[in-house]
Image (cartoon, rainbow, N blue to C red):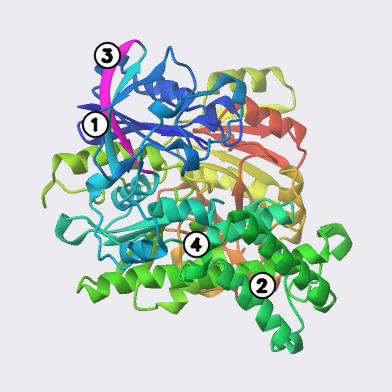
Amino acid sequence: MTVIGISCGHDANACLIVRDKFVYYSNAERNDRFKGSSSYIEAIKAVIRSSGIVTSQIDTIMITNTQACALPIENEKLFMVKEWIKAPVLFRSDNSHVYKCNSTSPKYFSYQNSSNWFPTPMSNHCKTYDELEALANSSKQAHPRDFIFKGNFKFEGLDISGYFVEHHFAHAISGLVRNKDCQLIISLDGSGHSPELIAKFPYIAGISILNPSNKIIIGPPPLFMGGILYSWASKYCNLSEGKFMGLASYFNINQSFTNSKQWIDLLTRLETLFDSSCKSVYNIKIETITKQMNFILSDLTKYFEGKLVLDYSQITKRDVYKINLPERWKILIAGVVQEVFSRLYIKSIKNQISFFKRKGLSARRVLITGGCVLNCPSNRILCETFPEIDFSFDNACNDEGLSIGAAYVLKFMKGYDSNNNLTSLINTPFLGDHPSHVKEALIIAKSDEQLSYKYSSNLKDDSVIIGNQLLEGKAIVLANGRYESGPRALGNRSLIALAELEKTHWMLNKIKRREYWRPIAPVIREKDFDDFFIGPKNSNMLMTNSVKFPEKLPGTTHVDGSARVQVLHDKSHLLWYLLEYLEEMGHCPVLANTSLNQSEEPLINSAPRIVSLMLDEPDIACAYIDGWIIKKVD
């Protein structure tokens, strides 16, 4: 059986599964170059082109979407929903409370009318908070079938049947098949939907599934609202969520004021406003909650902005004027919201774990997925709060793995046993295509007297050439193998430099055309981690750690003495050979690793674009593109 998995909406992606085996994956933005692209047709075309299959070979379409958005029809001649087969009673086709997704090219998208809207599953038509609470307490139990809905589609003129899979259920199945031995999967979204929407569709805010002995059990809906707070507060400050998180590290309030009644009251009010366990939340209109949040943030700024202390003692060489921080009130709000978000995040996850424990179904290996996993400081607090639990964090937490989750739901539906289970089907984050148009890039390099190039298949020898460029204080492009299926560049589409150099911080942010106050992440081999960092280890760059000796790693130590560390396990990866070479040469075996892109640009997969970037940026010395070393002539 040949299955196409499709994720519609922002960060659209697609994958191909043939006879239950993963074959190809594509993210739309890596092909059409629109950041966060909604063109799932572009992703599908890339999968078909790379795999070599023909449309007539596709048996089933498994489709999901971004949280609570409509199903966009990008090109009716290529893809269209013919009909939804009779839905179970627990499904609901109601467009009055469903948001339409944002597209990078809205004029090319149309939306189905109300009679044909995609189904939004819910386990109970909750009309009151008491009914919602009953669902949350699991006196009314959800079933996996509540999150899957059959349909018939038209794809390139062919009639193909398939299913729609609810957003968070796709998240959970994606996490299950990509992470070895996880028992409990909890998905919490970071999207900015309203409490009203969560009340009407309780699983919109997240889901938890337990997989004991290969039998999926659905937990109560998390009803998580921390993502709403984070999204709204970042917009209040006119910042993206990623920038908001980075800015929070500069927060350092005068401790004498944190015990004041006024301070405690404001933080309590903010937490209560977005705490789904408070019955009053669901009796307040969205406009009222927004206004109350704005009042609280305004009061925080009014009374405590002057008490903020900007402490640069960790990184003495960084000039406060060169960093060019945003206004102090934004730092204050970022720090406060980060604190409140973490409280809500820990509470929600604790509630899910406790529910299964009360049922006699405990889990020691817990995977967290969904957009909220991108909040690295909260992940560390979570690990330290529950040291007895082995937490992992899905590398494709931000919707980039949804097509994979949707596709593998079909395997779950067919039934599985101990010899044919869902776990450990995919054991790498590198699922995308290889760099594109490499021949064209070599033609450009050949015609430019500034560049030379050569091919090598020996990573150890290559690491010496690249390592020597690093030791000269230069930046290097790594575009090797398949690209990552998540938002973090884990070494296959990366810009790297020496973590031990202060200039690395400025150089990489300059190349990326982004604010100088933004942090740069380090990568280190697992065996060296304890020599330089403190805290839980994470291979997907989703954990904040403390730096033991900030003066040794000024290029990757954030202003608060922290770093978002990528822990490397793969001894066959080029990064491993580079770190080994640095150690042999007497340098710190730590590299700065940041994504291969510039501001508002997706991760680069085009080899000609890499050559163009090299020529534009004097600090980039060479690029490694699938065995080809393209180097600037001395």
Residue for badge 3:
56
Q: In this orientation, which residue lies closer to the viewer: 159 or 314?
A: 159
Position of 119 compared to 613: left or right? left
Q: Position of residue 222 (x, y in %)?
A: 40, 62
Which residue is found at the position 49% from the left and 33% from the top? 626
Residue for badge 1:
86
Q: Is residue 522 above or below residue 614?
A: below
10 Å crowding of disc 3: few (<14), some (14-19), many (20+): few
The alpha-carbon separation of the residues under discs 1 and 2 comes to: 57 Å
Q: Are marks 1 and 2 in contact (CB under 8 Å)?
A: no
Which residue is found at the position 54% from the left and 70% from the top? 342
Q: Which residues are magenta?
A: 157-166
Q: Residue furthest right?
A: 321
The alpha-carbon separation of the residues under discs 2 and 3 comes to: 56 Å
The alpha-carbon separation of the residues under discs 3 and 1 comes to: 26 Å
Is residue 54 something that shows in the picture? Answer: no
Label 2: state its secondary structure.
loop
Q: Quadrant of residue 618?
A: top right
Whether the magenta-drawn stretch holds residue 165 is answered as: yes
Nearest-to-viewer mark from 2 and 3: 3
